[in-house]
Structures are given as structure tokens and as C-alpha cells.
Amino acid sequence: MRRHLVFLHYDPEGHVDTAVLHTLRGFRPHVEKIFVVVNGFLDDESRGRLDSVADEVMERENVGFDIGAYRAALGRIGYSELSQYDELLLVNYTFFGPVGSFGDLFERMDASSVDFWGMTDHIAVTPHPILGVGTMPQHLQSYWLAIRNRMFMAPEFREYWSGLKNANSYHDVIVKFETEFTQHFADRGFTWEAAYSHERYGTLNASMEAPLALLDDGCPMFKRRIYFHDAVDRDHSGVAAAEVTRRALELGYPRAELIDGIYRRTPSRQLSTAMDAYLMMSEPSTESPASDESRVNVFEGDFWKSWLGEGQDVFGESGVVFRIGGDFNTETASATMRAARERALNVTLRQSDEVLAAIERDEQLGFVVPLVEHRSTDVLGNGYGKHVFQIGELTDLLGIRAPLEPDAPLTPVFGISVLREEAFADLPARIAAAGGWGSVAASVGGEGALSEMLDLLAADIARTSGFITAQAATPFQMRVSHAMLEQKFSRVASRFGPGPKSPFGGAIRANTPRAVVARWVKNRSPEAAARIAALERTAKGAAKGSLSSLRQVAKRVVGR
């Protein structure tokens, strides 16, 4: 079958990652023409990358989202040229693939006699999840639409594109294009099919809610959105990005391309979790002596000031530095804090051989921090603490890539961490371009504040250069931490309604006598509960009115 691919690409910075190149190279054996339409612009390097794999690249003003891009591409190509092909592919950049090859997919779908097909479909939903009224029809998802000659050469196809209004937002694309395209042409007698139908997966949206099952069924792609969508929000469907990563890598998807495709849009902790970036260290044992600390590059003190402010060579010849902090007083620190610091040293400096081996194995591992355990800490969930209002200013000043981790940045524990020089190599130039150490420090509240903020941003500094961060822990530490987390979570979740999204959605379940009685009544008789609630609202309204009247009387009395 002769195929013509129209591939839509968009990046706000004009960048083309290696995952896109992998996709286009994967198409090459199966299509005769690759036409890339770019919404917006391309930097010079990215333009060269696309020119090396595509037959034609068209840059256009970023107007109309997918609708505007495809209409412009069809206009540039022309139906006279398209008439020579059996199948037109309208595909965008929002997935990773191929996992393996697109070959089996095309071979299977070539045997289908439908007029158009897609990779996956979305079930009909009432009410419409975006409009709030009516029904969103069952539809093929628009990241992959394959249209046969009988349909794309029909007058109805040209009329559709000439009459379709440009989208003005992401939701506009869904409402005007994605959810209506399938029904529009089905109503006109054209037949369609999903290569991987929702019926097999029992979900609304298999591409987001059943990615593992899709991969296991031979689907040659998985969605990028899995890696930057709210991980907690995806919990209801049991999707863990790390599982998707592992399965895709097992099936042959290249890890470097995956990281290159997600690091620019994914917060550092979410990126680390998605890549399963945990270093499982050996348990401390007298039978297995610790690493020889004298053979590694160790820094104690104010790391950032010494390096960026005073110009010390902190990385040495090895290109890796083990930080151990500098302001920890073992004489005055509590036993709890001393023990926590010992655990942090046990999984970094005292096992430096294992850490260095991990860094040597993984070219994209740039930063290692001890696991922040779920005990005796206020770090998790504390975000950027007292620096919350200045952190954005510093990231802008230094050009550190957003989005930042919103709740719990990956940070050194007691200043203990391991840095790979390559992951931080351009930081001195960033500091210099912002006016130098002294100027930057003055703008954020002093040298101490700047050092603290750089600790908070270290994982994102590494991510800006394309490196990931790993957390180091022993298996026993992980078990202890998880056990405490279970108890904490159970206690918090008991205040909320049931369901995987609790306690992250819904009203707080108070344990007052009134709340307990209200829940009992609602469980026994929802109708009675609704009537009581209505009466309660009426009574509260009357009480407010009476209170207001009493206040007015009091004002008049006082006024006299």
C-alpha cells in the first residue's frame, strides 16, 4: 500500500527531540513520503534534524492548532499529488514509537476494508466532559488517523477541511476535531475501525488508562502524556509510569530517546519516579566493609559558594563529587537527627563504589540524593519552604527549566548528595550571565539563601541539561519508610471518602457526632439525607437572618 505521512510537530521552543526522529525513522520503511508540518518555528539544529529524515518540512505560524496545521499541509501537498497514494496518515508528535516496528500494525490494518482507521478510540461519554451537555461520541483519537484514497479523494473530505474552523485552544481541538471527525464521516457512509478498540480494555481511554495492556497486545506506541500528566490523578486507573517505562524498554524502545522526549516537560521527582531511578544499596554490614572514602572526591562545607563564588575545583579529575554537608554539629544534634544523617551517609559516601558504578553504567544519571524517609521529617510536602516566593525569580534568572516539582523537590539530605560534573557543567556560565555570585546572592537574600535555593533546585538544574536524579536507599530503609507511609496515609484517608483519588479529592470527612450521624443517614436513606440537608440549609438561612436582625438592633441600641 502506498502511503503518504503528514506528521504534525509543535514545540514552544522550536526544539525537535530524538524521540521524534526515532518515530519518523520508524515510519520510513512503510511510507513513500514524509511531510512534516511545524506549528511555530524550529531552531537551526532542529531544522537540520528534520531535514535529515523528512522529504519536506513546512514551518507555519502557530495558528489553529492541529486543524490549522493539517489544513495547511493538505493545501501545500495538493489533492493531485495525494491521488497517487492509497493511504494518507495524519499523525502528531504526542506519542512515543515505534516500540519495535510499525510493520505488524500496517500489515494487519492493510487487510481491513474500512475507509479510515486509528490506533485507539475513546468511548462515548454523557454528559460531554468538556461541554457539560450532550454526548461526546465514540471516536478515533486524532493523534493517529489513517485515511484511505476512497475517502480523502471524496468531495466530502475537501468540504470538511474547507468548512472546519480553526481551533483556539487544546479543548477546542478536541471538541471541533478529535471528537467529531469520526462521527462526521461515519454519518456520510464511510466505515472506520480502531486498531486497538476500547472494547478489549474496558476503559474510556485505553491510551492513557491501559498503556501496559496495549503494549502487551503489540501496540507500537505509548503516549507522552503519561509522563507529565498528574501522577496522582492517574492513580484511579492503576497506571504507574515506571511500569510503562520498564515494559517499553523490555520491548526495545531506546531509553535515551525516552528521557530526551520527557525531561523538558516533566518535574524532576516525577521524571525520577517514571524512570524508576532508585539505587538499591547494600545493607550496612561488618562483614562487607564500606567503600574506601579516601579514594573518592569528597567535599565538606558550603559547596555552592566555594564552587560558584570562589572558583574552587570541587569536582577534581574524577568529575564526580560526594558532598557531606558542613554545618552539622554532632554534639548538639538530637539522636534522631544523628541517626538520619548516618543513614544518608551509609547509602552515599560509605558505598561510593556502588554509587560510582551506577553513574558509570548510566550516562544520564547526573545527581544522587539519599532517600527522604517517611519518618521524622517535614521536608516532604514542604515544597520550597521560606524560599517559595523567590524560587521562581531564581529559575528565571538562571534559565532553569520549568516545570518545577511543586510539593517535594529532590534535595540533598543534610547537604549529602553526589553530583556528576557534566550535569552541572553550564551552571557557572549561568551564574556569570546573571551578574556573578555576589549579584545573584544579593537578589535572593544573601549567600546563605542562594546556597539553600540551589540545593532545592539541584535536581532541576541537572534536568535542564538532560540528566535524571536517583534516590539511594537500602531495601530495609524502603520497607521502613513504606510502612510508615501506609500508616500516615491510612490516617489521612480516613478523613475522606473511599476511592483511589482520596485524600486528593472530595470533602473532608469530619469525625464530629453530626458528621457520623449524617454519614449513617446518607448510607441508610439518601433521600432522607437530602431532605434533612434541605431543611438544614433553610434553618441556617433563617438563623442568619435572625442574627442579622439582632445585630441591627444592637447597633441602634449602642447608637443611642
Image: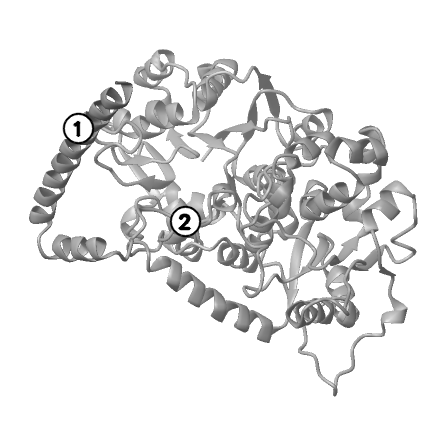
Q: For mark 2, what is the residue?
A: 234
Which quadrant of the rendered structure holds the C terminus?
top left
Q: Which mark is residue 545?
A: 1
- Give the left or right position of residue 277, taking residue 166 as reference: right
Along the line of sight, the residue nearer the viewer: 386 or 135: 386
Q: Residue at x 46, y 44 (%)?
A: 230
Query: Of circles 2 and 1, which is in front?
Result: 1
- Camera-side residue of 456 and 418: 456
Q: Amino acid at mark 1?
A: Gly
The structure residue drawn at horizontal position 55% and vertical position 66%, both measured from the top left corner, is 375
Relative to 559, is 330 above or below?
below
Q: Residues within 10 Å of mark 2 (few under 14, many from 20)?
A: some
Q: Colour scheme used in the picture?
A: one colour
44 vs 271: above or below: above
448 in relation to 419, above or below: above
Q: Earlier in the sequence, mark 2 or mark 1?
A: 2
Q: Is residue 327 left or right of residue 336?
A: right
Picture coordinates of residue 97 (x, y %)?
53, 44
Q: Is 340 on the left or on the right of 480, as rendered?
A: right
Residue extending furthest bottom? 287
Q: Residue at x 44, y 43 (%)?
A: 106
Q: x, y (%) of residue 186?
A: 24, 28
Q: Secondary structure at mark 2?
A: helix
Q: Amino acid at mark 2?
A: Arg
Image point (83%, 51%), residue name: 302
| Residue in the foreground of this view, choosing between 55 and 50 | 50
